């Protein structure tokens, strides 16, 4: 088990990964590494992990890949008994019965993967079986350039709902020049493809990624699909505290994308981390009018948190309107 520094810690606030990065099981297919947010294929090299089967003394939030679940089931059960939370990503075949029984609500969360077919993504795995066993199950939407990119995102959200997702997390993945050249050469033919060339090589990919995230939010709002990650909880951080903190982290990222260097996102980020460390139930703090006991909950942050958690009110309504504006 290794400590990780995720590319998008606001979207996937995890601290460790168990086992090696994923590997696609079929030639031509691609899966997503949620830590580095890059596509991984069957022929790619993987770093060899150092074997570590010592159960940590304090609960951790751990990313686990499908192949690791199949290989290290007994150790995962020990982690759960010790209070750690697991975010299991479905980057390979996995039966719901292979997952350990959680000791607390939201301790084991399942995250399917959606990668655009243009980049070799496989169809979404059904999630109903995981939900029936009590595991919160959602989909990580990997956003990348592809023909008709906005329509592609709308289809992805719809497919997540059809697969049984209770939530989605949308994040752009890296498309280095090598991957873009491979995709272009496979589809352009001998005469070339001007539109595809413009998309892959003459587009501001950062700006496109931000617009794809915003389109995902518009579609989630239209379909009533939550975007907040509901775990993993641990024995010391209840699910409600994690979910509330994750929602503040999500909007911290969005404020940064909207406002750049003048963003107030750092205030939400600081408060979210303090809330997670406090292990307090947000609903109880709100009912007691006691959010200010958590460091970082200034009057503006408190107002934003209350309105964001309830889904309406200022200043959340203003930020949401700016985020989904077309």
Image (cartoon, helix red, strand yellow):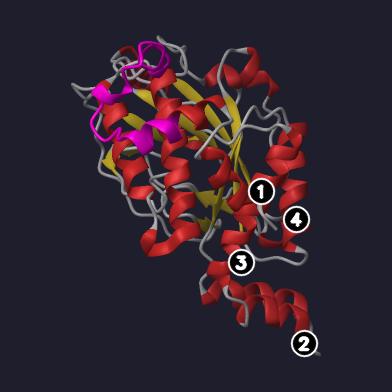
Q: Looking at the image, is mark 3 or mark 4 nearer the viewer? A: 3
Whichever of callouts 1 and 2 sits on the residue coming sooner in the sequence is: 2
Classify mark 1: residues with Cα within 10 Å, few (<14), some (14-19) or many (20+).
many
Find numbered disc 3 in the image and state the secondary structure of the residue it sits on. Answer: helix
Residue 11 visible from this viewpoint? no
Whichever of callouts 3 and 4 sits on the residue coming sooner in the sequence is: 4
Find numbered disc 2 in the image and state the secondary structure of the residue it sits on. Answer: loop
Q: Position of residue 1 (x, y in %)?
A: 29, 37
Residue 302 drawn in magenta: yes
Q: Which residue bears the numbered disc 1? A: 216
Alpha carbon of mark 3 to alpha carbon of mark 1: how far? Answer: 12 Å
Q: Nearer the viewer, residue 58 or 210?
A: 210
Q: Nearer the viewer, residue 222 or 71?
A: 222
Q: Is residue 319 above or below residue 148?
A: above
Residue plotted at (73% across, 78% down): 196
Alpha carbon of mark 1 to alpha carbon of mark 2: how far? Answer: 31 Å
Q: Which residue bears the numbered disc 2? A: 192
Whichever of callouts 2 and 3 sits on the residue coming sooner in the sequence is: 2
> From which residue to which does the magenta span run?
282-305
- Dividing the picture into quadrants, the one containing residue 278 is top left
Q: Is residue 245 above or below residue 147?
A: above
Count all numbered tags in the image, as a single digit.
4
Left or right? Give the position of 235 relative to 224.
left
Left or right? Give the position of 106 relative to 196.
left
């Amino acid at each position: 088990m290794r400590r990780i520094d995720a590319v998008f810690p606001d979207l996937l606030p995890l601290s460790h990964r168990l086992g090696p990065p994923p590997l696609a099981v079929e030639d031509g297919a691609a899966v997503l590494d949620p830590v580095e947010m890059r596509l991984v294929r069957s022929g790619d090299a993987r770093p060899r992990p150092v074997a570590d089967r010592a159960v940590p003394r304090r609960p951790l939030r751990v990313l686990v890949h499908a192949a690791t679940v199949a290989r290290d089931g007994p150790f995962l059960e020990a982690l759960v008994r010790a209070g750690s939370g697991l975010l299991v990503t479905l980057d390979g075949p996995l039966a719901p019965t292979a997952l350990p029984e959680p000791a607390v609500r939201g301790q084991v969360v399942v995250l399917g993967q959606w990668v655009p077919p243009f980049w070799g993504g496989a169809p979404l795995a059904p999630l109903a079986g995981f939900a029936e066993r009590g595991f919160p199950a959602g989909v990580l939407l990997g956003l990348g350039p592809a023909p008709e990119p906005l329509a592609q995102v709308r289809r992805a959200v719809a497919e997540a709902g059809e697969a049984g997702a209770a939530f989605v997390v949308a994040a752009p993945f890296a498309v280095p020049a090598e991957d873009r050249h491979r995709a272009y050469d496979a589809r352009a033919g001998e005469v070339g493809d001007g539109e595809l060339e413009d998309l892959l090589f003459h587009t501001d990919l950062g700006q496109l990624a931000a617009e794809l995230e915003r389109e995902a939010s518009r579609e989630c709002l239209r379909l009533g699909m939550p975007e907040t990650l509901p775990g993993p909880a641990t024995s010391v951080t209840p699910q409600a505290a994690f979910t509330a903190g994750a929602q503040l982290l999500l909007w911290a990222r969005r404020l940064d994308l909207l406002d750049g260097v003048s963003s107030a996102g750092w205030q939400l980020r600081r408060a979210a981390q303090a809330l997670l460390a406090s292990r307090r139930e947000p609903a109880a703090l709100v009912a007691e009018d006691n959010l200010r006991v958590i460091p970082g909950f200034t009057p503006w942050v408190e107002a934003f948190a209350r309105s964001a958690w309830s889904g309406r009110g200022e200043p959340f309504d203003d930020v949401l309107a700016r985020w989904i504006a077309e």
